[in-house]
Amino acid sequence: MKKLTYLLAAAAVFTACNSGNNGYTVTGTIEGAADGDTVYLQTVEGRQLVKLDSAIIANGTFTFKGTQDTAANRYITYNPAGTEGMIMDFFLENGKINIKLNEKSSSATGTANNDIYQAIRIQLNELDSQMENIYASMADTALTDQQRESKSKEMDALQDKMMEVAKAGISQNITNAVGVHLLKSNYYYLDVKELDPLVSQIPATYSNDATVIRIKENVEKMKATAVGKKFTDFEMQTPEGKTVKLSDYVGKGKTVLVDFWASWCGPCRREMPNLVEAYAKYKNKNFEIVGVSLDQSADSWKEAIKKLNITWPQMSDLKYWNCEGAKLYAVSSIPHTVLIDGDGIILARGLHGEELQEKLAEVLK
């Protein structure tokens, strides 16, 4: 595997660790590796890989031994000079774990969590292969716009299948290490109705986990800003430096679309023509848009406003992902929209493209 990807768990029944208190033995092989090469056992701290242990390949294999109190997601990395290297995540837990690292079909098996994790790896590889084939075929300059659009929809459908597997894997494994890891990796794709019943099932061993704590906090914020709830106010600055509140626009009788975006966000920029169209169509029909930028640079923010033909009110605190408004509304990916009625009640969240246009047509008819 040339790039680090989070793997999603298949729906499976969790069984107890098969090793008792005998510790772990990780034995593995690496395609193309030579005796004397070094393999690393690593973890992630922040966004950096940190080395925990190393092993030298001898007679074609490497071995790690030790004890592990609770199963934890770890990485095997192999990156000799002059190569692209390989990396794979797995679950370090007591028992005998067998690792096979190669370009196309890496695997980790032998213990309960790894067997669950590996089951879906095969399915993901198949879906990923299909996506790569479609993507490669789109380079054909002879394709018509209609054919290209059709292939793009095929890729979207495959992405949806991956997400379906993820959600099933999380819900059916939430009481074990696999499910918790998957939730931590994918919670920003789940809405409050999906997250709320999951967080209460997370094992107590994760009560001090920083990401789990953040997920639980986000769920409470999502519940407070869910459809049907009164909007939550916040204040920021306009591009001109004036302090304004969301309540300066919301709850005044107009339907307001709050758009969380940033100049550095490609999907936000691609969605902007849809908002420009909606604003032109409905701005004289008691409709307003308020942009909340997650930018850090005021210059980049202002330049994007001009280039993207944004003519509606804007605000930002230039705090990137620490944007106070985004945190209050548990925004974990952008673009993200919140549609609010004239009385300040939230009507919808996360609408884009055709869905947004359809909702606006319904509300502003």
Image (cartoon, rainbow, N blue to C red):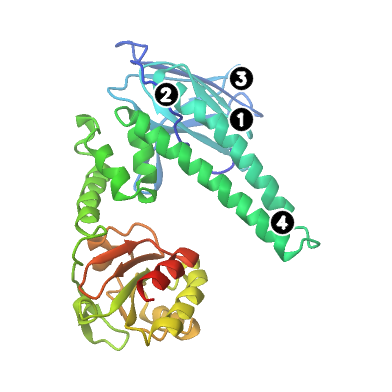
The residue where tag 4 is placed is 138
Secondary structure type for disc 4 = loop
The residue where tag 2 is placed is 12
The residue where tag 3 is placed is 60
Taking 198 as reference, is 63 above or below it?
A: above
At label 3, the amino acid type is Gly
The residue where tag 1 is placed is 105
At label 2, the amino acid type is Ala
Residue 201 appears at what percent x and percent y?
24, 33
- How far is disc 4 from disc 3 in space, using C-alphas? 40 Å
Secondary structure type for disc 1 = loop
At label 4, the amino acid type is Met
Q: Is residue 220 left or right of residue 65?
A: left
- How far is disc 1 from disc 4 in space, using C-alphas? 25 Å
N-terminal label among 2 and 3: 2
N-terminal label among 4 and 2: 2
N-terminal label among 3 and 1: 3
